Image (tube, rainbow, N blue to C red):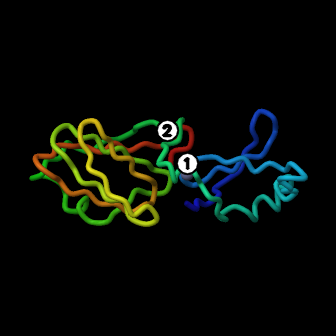
Amino acid sequence: MLRKIAAFHQDEENHWVADLDCGHTQHTRHEPPFFPRPWVLNEDSRSTHIGTSLNCVRCDRQEMPEEFVAYRRTATFTSGSIPNGLRKHHSTKRGIWGVINILEGQLRYRIHEPYNCEVVLDQNTKGIILPEIEHAVEPLKSAEFYVEFWHNPSNPV
Ligand SMILES: [Zn+2]
C-alpha cells in the first residue's frame, strides 16, 4: 500500500533512506544505471519528495516496524464492556500501530481498505492494527481482550 514520505536519513554507508509515515523505512539510493535518483542527493529536491508516496510492502505484509515498542494499553474489555467505538470503523493516528491481544474467547477483526479482510482472533492469533487503516471488531463467544498501542520510541508522534 502507499505510504507518505515523512523524512529522509542516511544509513551507515551514506545511502539515503526514506522514513515513511507508517514507521517503515525504504532505501532511495542514487545508483545509476538501475536506480538513477539524482534528486536524492540534493536537499532541496529531497524536500520536494516529502509527502509523496512510496509503495510499502512491509505494510502489505502487516509487519510492525522492529524498533517499535508498546507504550500504552486499554483496559481489558469483555463482550459486555466493549466500547461502541471499537465496533465501528475507526483507526489509529499516523505512526501508531496496535496489537489486539485475546485473553479468552474469540473476536472478529475486520480491516477495511485497502486490505478488505476479516480474521477471527483468539489466544493464539493476535490482531495487528496498522496506522490510519480503518478497522472494526466484533466479539464472538465470550471474548476478553485488550489493545496495546506501539510507537517508535525515538520518534514518538
Ligand atoms: Zn509501512
Q: Nearer the viewer, residue 74 or 20?
A: 20
Q: Residue at x 77, y 46 (%)?
A: 16
Going by the numbered disc 2, the residue's amino acid type is Phe
From the image, tell me which residue sits under label 1.
Answer: 58
Name the quadrant containing residue 5: bottom right
Q: Residue at x 69, y 61 (%)?
A: 50
- Near mark 2 (Cα within 10 A), the count class, few <14, some 14-19 or many ≥20, is many
Secondary structure at numbered mark 2: loop
Q: How many marks?
A: 2
Label 1 C-beta lies within 8 Å of the nearest ligand 1 atom: yes
Quadrant of the snapshot with the N terminus: bottom right
In the image, residue 136 lies at what x, y percent? Answer: 29, 60
Going by the numbered disc 1, the residue's amino acid type is Arg
In the image, residue 36 lies at what x, y percent? Answer: 86, 56
Q: Nearer the viewer, residue 23 or 142?
A: 142
In the image, residue 72 lies at what x, y percent? Answer: 35, 41
Secondary structure at numbered mark 1: helix
Task: State which mark lies toward you, 2 or 1.
Answer: 1
In screen coordinates, is 147 left or right of 45? left
From the image, tell me which residue sits under label 2.
Answer: 68
Of pointers 2 and 1, the one earlier in the residue sequence: 1
In screen coordinates, is 5 left or right of 80? right
Q: Are marks 2 and 1 in contact (CB under 8 Å)?
A: no
In the image, residue 121 lies at what x, y percent? Answer: 26, 46
* Residue found at the very far right of the displayed protein: 33
- Near mark 1 (Cα within 10 A), the count class, few <14, some 14-19 or many ≥20, is some
Label 2 C-beta lies within 8 Å of the nearest ligand 1 atom: no
Q: Residue at x 55, y 48 (%)?
A: 58
Q: Residue at x 22, y 50 (%)?
A: 107
Alpha-carbon distance for marks 2 and 1?
14 Å
In screen coordinates, is 61 left or right of 98? right
